[in-house]
Amino acid sequence: MSTRTPLMAGNWKMNLNHLEAIAHVQKLAFALADKDYDACEVAVLPPFTDLRSVQTLVDGDKLKIKYGAQDLSAHDSGAFTGEISGPMLAKLKCTYVAVGHSERRQYHAETDEIVNAKVKSAFKHGLTPILCVGEELAVREAGNHVSHTLAQVDGGLKDVPAEQAESIVIAYEPVWAIGTGKVCGAGDAQEVCAAIRSRLAELYSQELADKVRIQYGGSVKSGNVAEIMANPDIDGALVGGASLDADEFVKIVRFRDQ
Ligand SMILES: O=C(CO)COP(=O)(O)O
């Protein structure tokens, strides 16, 4: 297990309206408040329409839970109907923003160039990007999962200076493990996460690579999180479905107590 503070983030995807979001974050806060739980950093990534409600709750009650968005526009403002900008998320005091999730790449045709522009926009506005990378099943079956994922890392970080890159979070999410119940074997996830860290050392420095948190995502649950987290290069989880159940997400956050 690494010395980096693990980041356990719940990607709610298109689930939970703003009232449900309030109830859910209250449950998380209550369940994590019985002791000062600093072993992990905890974040939620709700839909855009929930962010104001979550901000009000977190600010008002000084909760330690961080929050962020699931995407942002590469542009600061202008005629981009339906888009949400980095400055808007920064105004809501978001800490994180997911960029390049496979569902964005797949359903919204996001290329590495677009993902790179979004990473830069996030940093420009003081948000921490969670850069999502990972291969489809056919790529893994062909044995090209490492090179495919590293190409996404290279693309996402193109021309991003070290002062910014050192605070990025990278989430390795093999597409075939997302929402399928097929968790990537802990050794297989470690192989790719270690390769990502080596690539960061090549692109920047070993010192920077040692700082960056690399999460695993894809069918993470309370029953498999401890095994995943036992790997030296895995510094947290990006949790989809299991993050919608507050009790289950709390168990994931408390993986060390199992
Ligand atoms: O896509 C994911 C998180 O971003 C993972 O989703 P599941 O945990 O539902 O597999």
Image: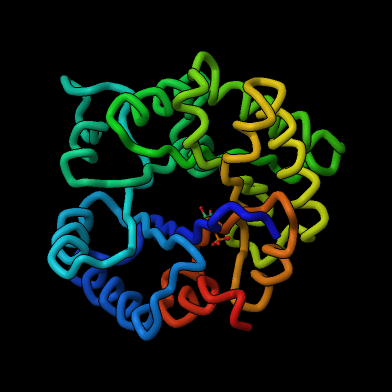
Residue 68, given in percent of the width and then of the height, sits at 32, 49
Task: Indicate how the structure is coloured in the image.
Answer: rainbow
Left or right of 172, for residue 68: left
Residue 210, given in percent of the width and then of the height, sits at 65, 39
Q: Is residue 212 above or below residue 80?
A: below
Location of the N terminus (image quadrant): bottom right
Left or right of 10, for residue 21: left
Left or right of 40, for residue 142: right
The residue under the point 66% across, 67% down is 181
Quarter-wise, where is residue 10 in the image? bottom left
The residue under the point 24% across, 65% down is 17
Q: Is residue 203 above or below residue 233?
A: above
Residue 244, given in percent of the width and then of the height, sits at 42, 71
The residue under the point 30% across, 74% down is 24
Counting every numbered tag in the picture gives 0
Quarter-wise, where is residue 222 in the image? bottom right
Left or right of 208, for residue 142: right
Residue 35, given in percent of the width and then of the height, sits at 40, 82
Q: Is residue 203 above or below residue 23?
A: above
Location of the C terminus (image quadrant): bottom right
The residue under the point 46% across, 77% down is 250
Q: Residue furthest top?
A: 159
Instruction: Work out whether residue 16 or residue 9 is closer to the camera in this orientation and state it.
Output: 9
| Ligand 1 lies in quarter | bottom right
